[in-house]
Structure formats: C-alpha cells, structure tokens
Image (cartoon, rainbow, N blue to C red):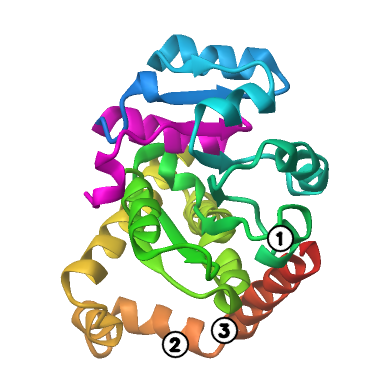
Amino acid sequence: MCAFVKDDVKLGVIGCGKMASAILGGIASHKFISSEDICVYDINIEHSGALCREYGFREAYSIQELMEYCDVILLAVKPFIVGEVLSEMKDFYNNHLILSILAGVKIQKYLKYIKNAKIIRIMPNTPALVQEGMSAVCANNNVDNDEVDFAFDLMSNCGKVIKTTEDKIDIITALSGSGPAFYFKIIELMANSATKLGLDKNEALLLSNQTALGSAKMIFENDFEIEQLIKNVTTPGGCTEVGNNVLNSSDMADILDKTIKDTMQKAIELG
C-alpha cells in the first residue's frame, strides 16, 4: 500500500450505481479504507442509503457536504450529466484528487470546469462485482506518483490493474470495459449450439462458462502463450482440429475487429 493511503485519506463517492457499489464493496471487504472514512452521495438517496446501511459509510446529502469532508473524490455518475456535476463541484474544489470511472470523458473536459484539477481516469469493468475486474488508470500532469499508486492500489481491491496513458483508454474501454458483454454472448452462443444438439440449457451454460473460466486461468498460468495452449488441446486429425478449421476459415476475426473498433469509436464520440 502506498504512503498516500496511510495518511488518513477520506474518500468521497459521487454516484452510487452498480460499478461504484462494486468498487466500494472491494474496498470495504479488504479494509483498504475504513468505512467511517468513506462518504457517499447520490441524487437517489435510496442508492446511497443502501450502501451506508450495508457497509457503515457516511452519507452526504449534497456535493458541497461531501467535498468539504473528503480529499479524494470518486466520480461515478452517468457521462451525459458530468458537466452539470462538475459545475457544482468547481465551487468547492480545493486540491482534491478526482478519480473518474466515466467512459469516454476526456481529462481535458474536466479541466474546462475545474482548472488545474488533479484527474485520474479509471476504466473498470463489471467483473469487479466478483472481485475479478480489469481496470486501467491514467493521470494528468497535476497528479503525483503517490496519487497514481493510490488509484492503482484502490482498484486492486477489485481485480487486476494496469497503468496506461489517455490515448489508449478508448481502446481499453472497447476491449475490457465493454468486453464482458462480448464474452457473455460468446459463452451463450456456444451453449446454445450444444443445446440444439440435445444438451439441457442450464447444463450447457455450466459447461460453456466453466470452460471459459478455466481457459482464462490457464492463459495466466502459461504466460499468455495462447498458440501453444491451442496446440496442447489439438490432436492432429482429432475433434478439436475440426473445430479449429471451422473457426480459422470463418470471418470471426473480422467480426471481432469490427466489434472492438466500433465500440472504441463510440467511446471517442462520448468525449
């Protein structure tokens, strides 16, 4: 844990949707920050109240109250209302470190509202809900190394993290931010194929899902040597080779290229 965390940081969270709740759940379960040092605000007090009851957080009833109490702000609102939120935040900004998990919203946009703000963009994904998330963090020049390390350590409570630069964030949004939905679809389609051939639907989903989980773990344990892993499963003239030939002769690579490219383009447009 970096030195920044040890200096009784008070974390404020604006927006208490599913992603923020997942991050806060990871922080609370690992005791990364004491619950009494976390303050949450949401325009829907049912959302903020539920988190406070579950984890013992402090509840704020305005952005002003939250910012006067906290020195680090996790911004987790919908991207289309960020201007409205920043307009209110700027009146109470006092060298806060702002962590943003908003897809597509560039650092420059924050600086239009809060000049010289310290901004770290974070691109998380929904597997943070089960502490198997993948996050990427990037910062503007106003942020020091300890503060970047703090953001990195904070997101490590929800899974794996990389440090990156903002010019790569939109690509990362497409690959890992939106990626869970694409993997869900592939897992479902493979299970559907087996169901058409006679397997029970739930049984097919279990087989497909566990196979995906185990395959991903094997990639980690074999230093990302994916081609070798494919060879290890494939017997010449056997069943897997037939399936590989179908995939290799299909337009699957083109479809996935377009999926990632179009998703990235949408993230760019959001900014």
Name the quadrant of the C terminus. bottom right
Distance between the Cα atoms at labels 2 and 3?
Answer: 13 Å
Q: Tell whether label 3 touches label 2 (CB within 8 Å).
A: no
Q: At 24% from the left edge and 86% from the top edge, which residue is drawn?
A: 231
Kindly check if marks 2 and 1 are in contact, taking CB atoms under 8 A apart as contact: no
Amino acid carrying mark 2 in the image: Asn
Query: What residue would you read off at disc 2?
Result: 245
> Where residue 181 sits in the image (x, y, percent)?
58, 54
Tell me which label, 3 or 1, sits earlier in the chain. Answer: 1
Is residue 143 depicted above or below 40 in this figure? below
How many marks on residues? 3
Q: Closer to the camera, 117 or 156?
A: 117
Judging by the rendered image, the residue that carries numbered circle 3 is 253
Q: Which residue is mark 1?
A: 111
The residue sitting at 81% across, 47% down in the picture is 83
Q: Badge 2 local density, few (<14 within 10 Å), some, or many (20+)?
A: few
**Label 3 residue SS:** helix
Judged left or right of residue 70, residue 5 is left
Q: Is residue 172 left or right of residue 46?
A: left
Quarter assignment of residue 44: top right
Q: Secondary structure at mark 1?
A: helix
Residue lying furthest top in this view?
53
Q: Dot 3: within a 10 Å radius of its alpha carbon, few (fewer than 14), some, or many (20 or more) residues? A: few
Give the magenta-colored segment's residue range: 1-30
Q: Residue 32, image x and y in percent?
A: 28, 36
Q: Which amino acid type is shown beneath numbered disc 3? A: Ala
Q: Nearer the viewer, mark 3 or mark 1?
A: 1
The disc labelled 1 sits on which kind of residue? Leu
